[in-house]
Image: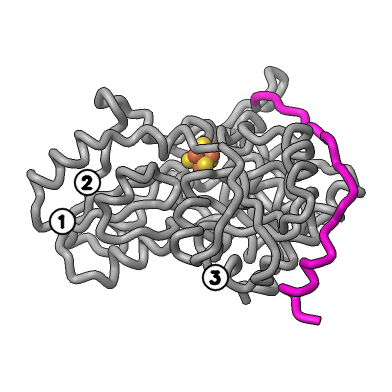
Amino acid sequence: MSVASSIQSTVQSTVTDFPAARSSHPPATAPPAPPPAQLPEAIDALRRERNAVILAHYYQDDAIQDIADVIGDSLELARRAASTEADVIVFCGVHFMAETAKILNPGRIVVLPDLAAGCSLADACPADEFAAFRARHSDHIVVSYINCSAAVKAQSDLICTSSNAVQLVQQLPKDRPILFAPDANLGRWVARQSGRELTLWPGSCIVHETFSEQALLELRLEHPEAEVIAHPECQQQLLDLADFIGSTSKLLQRAQTSEAPAFIVLTEPGILHQMQRRVPEKAFYPVPGSDGCSCNACPYMRLNTLEKLWHCLATLEPRIELDEELRLRALAPIERMLAMSA
Ligand code: SF4
């Protein structure tokens, strides 16, 4: 039986909620960190001492990206977390990403520099409300974007990322309806690309919802040579103005392979650091949020700092811990994703 057809046997048991404890880090009793100038060297020494790997999302601050062993989007980091031999995984990203690393690595220590680094999208899909929604669509295959809690993953048949969502949905049995959660903007884009009708959970990302259409139009007038590249979590009216739409890693590839000399970028501006490093001769223009605010930077991702990274390597706290029953339920749809997108 193929992986896709095994999805016919949907997990029917209801998982209600297994909330993770959240707090800010470091606590008042934590040892003092070295001065800022010495932090990179001190982090490097601790990384070797602990046999730790530092995984960082493209939306992290430049200083964290520069010290990481691996920089990637959700899919690349999940793959790397699945194959690591390190004893400790330091996940510089947000909570659901570190949780995914723990789901894949129950025997390894997984730490997140700041446990308060959540995600508005994951928070917009509480597990008990999702269970009720799923019950109202009990004949549907449940596909969840990786930006959700372990308790929502555990209720899903298949996990996807923005890199592989279209490819995975196209592999699903044609005679079964599909429920897609939690990002409705991404879901609408996947439906258009795959030709499949999707029933959508009404969630969205506060960062990708914030880009100003007016500012984008002005940037286009100012830089007519620039290509507009957008993440599919953006709203439809902005995607309609884009020349290229793709996941964070595909936007990075596009910046390298397109002949355009400049790009107007509709995603979290942390990615500009890698774009500028890889093609320094090209120009990149982030699109501001409405009212010119800097709310296009993810406030959760930016909670992690070099100092907190040092603290979590020094103390091996705060750790991600998961109930084993929940972990096993959340693992199955992630493993399907990794098999189907191999
Ligand atoms: S950018 Fe949006 S989806 Fe990504 S972590 Fe931040 S709030 Fe969540």
Q: In which quarter of the image is the N terminus?
A: bottom right
Tag 2: residue type?
Tyr
Q: Residue 226 carries which label?
A: 1
Query: Between residues 14 and 260, which one lies in front from this camera angle?
Result: 14
Q: In which quarter of the image is the C terminus?
A: bottom right
Q: Which of marks 3 and 1 is in front?
A: 3
Q: Residue 167 carries which label?
A: 3
Q: Which of marks 1 and 2 is in front?
A: 1
Task: From this view, report whether residue 112 is shown above or below residue 239.
Answer: above
Callout 3: helix, strand or loop? helix
Residue in the image at 79% along x and 50% along y: 138
Task: Compare marks 2 and 3 and give the one earlier in the sequence.
Answer: 3
Q: Does the residue labelled 2 lie within 8 Å of ligand 1?
A: no
Q: Which residue lies furthest to the bottom in this view?
A: 1
Tag 1: residue type?
Ala
Q: Which residue lies furthest to the top in this view?
A: 28
Q: Disc 1 and disc 2: Cα gap in Å? A: 9 Å
Point out the stretch of residues depicted in magenta.
1-24
254 is within the stretch colored magenta: no
Residue in the image at 61% along x and 32% along y: 124
Task: Compare marks 1 and 2 and give the one earlier in the sequence.
Answer: 1
Residue in the image at 69% along x and 39% along y: 314
Callout 1: helix, strand or loop? strand
